[in-house]
Amino acid sequence: MSLETAQSAMTADPNAQLANAADAFKAFTTETPIALRDDKGRFASEQPEQELDEAEPQGEAEADDAEELDADEVADEAQPEPVERPASWSNEDADLWESLPVDAQGKIAEREAERDRAVNQKFQEAANVKKATEAQLSEANANRDAYSQAIEQVLSMVQPVAPDPRAYGAGTGNYDRESYDLAVVQYQDTMQTVQALNQQRQAIAAQQETESKRAFQAELEAIEAVARPRFLADVPELTDPQKSNQVLGDIVRYAIETGIPEDVFSAESMNGVTSAELHIAWKAMQYDKITAAKGQVQATPAPKPAQPSIKPGVASSRSATRQATMRKANERLASEGSIEAGAAVWKNFLT
């Protein structure tokens, strides 16, 4: 204890003064810590310090709890959202997709997107190459056609004629043999040029015909890719080897009867007939059959349904009359099977 502390304590109690002075002297003579005294000279209690020490862990616990709550809130906020199922996963795989962890979903979706981008890029590159090739081919074909036209024009203008020796004085004594030989050489050169041009024209014509056939075949294949499945869906008998010939024969005969030239269906031309054309002919044939059946039904009037028997002096109920009418309509439908009979049953059912 310092001297100032001892002086301030002397103003309170003489006994406390002596005790404090003794404590101050002991402080100078020993390293043992001196217990504090109160104003009356009694040793001061250390309880408040313990209470403070005990209060500190409670505050620390509250701070720890607050930190844990903040961590939980941050963890909840950090939970990733479910990733949307890629288009390559079907609806049947929806449950499997939802069962995957979100991280796995994200990784799979990322790989799917990378694959789609790579595939689309390759498709685009192929389309660009195809477009450039088609442009070059179109330009080459245009130049070839122009060259073919030029050949035609040249050949129409050049008509080589073999030189006649008499035109150069043969047999007259003034025969110019040198000029004649030169004319023969020129004639031969011209003939070789004409022959070469004719060969080129024939080669160009063959190329044009081949390309025309190839384009026509590609067009037929494009039409068949769409029309054939629809045709087979409406006429499944075509897939049966035992029925297909009969069905096709009926369609061809109907087409010829309605005005289509017979040579269109010849062995040489049949390959040019598409499934779309045959499908149209089949639909027209079915329509004519339905129309003819309706005409027969209209031509034969349906018998009037018999009225229910009513006993004299007894009024029939409305339900009995309706049941009798419905029974007659059902009997008519069973015997005729026509659209009109079915409509009558439906009408009686609604009334």
Image: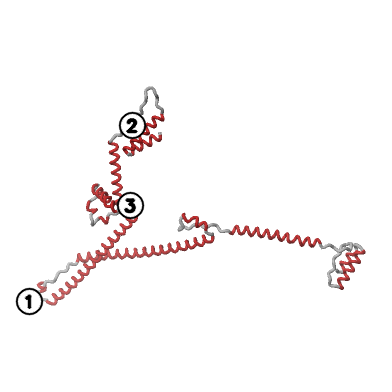
- Secondary structure under tag 1 reads loop
Q: Quadrant of the N terminus?
A: bottom right
| Disc 3: which residue | 232
Between circles 2 and 1, the one closer to the viewer is: 2
- Secondary structure under tag 2 reads loop
Q: Nearer the viewer, residue 222 or 215?
A: 222
Horizontally, residue 17 falls left or right of residue 202, namely right
Label 3 packing within 10 angstroms: few (<14), some (14-19), many (20+): some
Q: Earlier in the sequence, mark 2 or mark 1?
A: 1
Number of numbered tags placed on the structure image: 3
Q: Position of residue 145 (x, y in %)?
A: 27, 64
Q: Are marks 2 and 3 in contact (CB under 8 Å)?
A: no
Q: Nearer the viewer, residue 162 or 136?
A: 136
Q: CA distance from mark 2 to mark 1?
A: 121 Å
Tell me the residue at 29%/64% (across/down). Answer: 141
Q: Find residue 151 and report its image quarter.
A: bottom left
Horizontally, residue 34 falls left or right of residue 110, namely right
Q: Are marks 2 and 1 in contact (CB under 8 Å)?
A: no
Q: Position of residue 109 (x, y in %)?
A: 49, 60
Q: Position of residue 227 (x, y in %)?
A: 33, 53
Q: Amino acid at mark 2?
A: Pro
Q: CA distance from mark 2 to mark 3?
A: 43 Å
Task: Identify the residue at the far right of this view.
Answer: 14
Q: Amino acid at mark 1?
A: Gly
Disc marking residue 173: 1
- Secondary structure under tag 3 reads helix
Between circles 2 and 3, the one closer to the viewer is: 2
Task: Identify the residue at the far left of this view.
Answer: 172
| Disc 2: which residue | 305
